[in-house]
Image: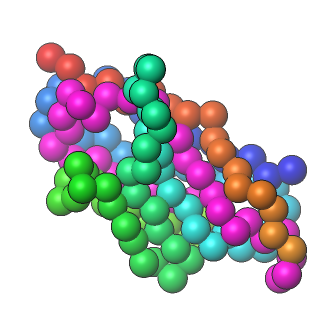
Amino acid sequence: QVQLVESGGGSVQPGGSLRLSCAASGSIFSIDVMGWYRQDPGKQRELVAVITRGAMTHYADSVKGRFTISRDNAKNTVYLQMNSLKPEDTAVYYCKADGVRTAPTTWLNPCWGQGTQVTVSS
């Protein structure tokens, strides 16, 4: 019922910037936590950043100071501003929603987006 759609990925040179967006759609009352994860071919999916409904954030050490996560609760949308991009940031970036409510006391299982490719190279 609930779908997450990422956008904003692409190819950039080292030091460049990209802004990812993830919009949740469907019958949504609220979303407790939204986050970004990434996965390189042959590697484990890793957490990049998460943000709560109250705007508390957590970042992976590898992106602290370079990436900024934010959200618009009214639009059920989460963003990831990525600056000073490095080749090691190359991966498929996935949006995740936890604590998705379709009613005040009705929670769905975690939802994942389809992913968007980010490539950082010269």
Could one spot residue 41 in this view of the protein? yes
Residue 114: name its quadrant.
Answer: top right
Q: Is residue 52 above or below residue 26?
A: below
Left or right of residue 113, residue 8 in this image: left
Left or right of residue 103, residue 19 in this image: left
Q: What residue is shown at x 70% (from left), y 68% (from top)?
A: 99
Q: Is residue 108 above or below residue 6?
A: below
- Percent position (x, y) of residue 55? 45, 77
- Percent position (x, y) of residue 5? 63, 42
Could one spot residue 93 in this view of the protein? no
Report the quarter where the C terminus lies.
Answer: top left
Q: Residue furthest top?
A: 122
Q: Foreground: 79 or 42?
A: 42
Image label count:
0
Residue 89: name its quadrant.
Answer: top left
- Percent position (x, y) of residue 6? 56, 41
Region of the chain picked out in magenta, as a range: 77-105
Q: Is residue 77 above or below residue 15?
A: below
Q: Foreground: 98 or 17?
A: 98
Q: Does residue 101 belong to the magenta stretch?
A: yes
Colour scheme of the picture? rainbow
- Percent position (x, y) of residue 95? 55, 47
> Magenta region's main secondary structure?
strand
Q: What residue is shown at x 21% (from left), y 27% (from top)?
A: 87
Q: What residue is shown at x 47% (from left), y 68% (from top)?
A: 51
Q: Does residue 84 belong to the magenta stretch?
A: yes
Left or right of residue 87, residue 91 in this image: right
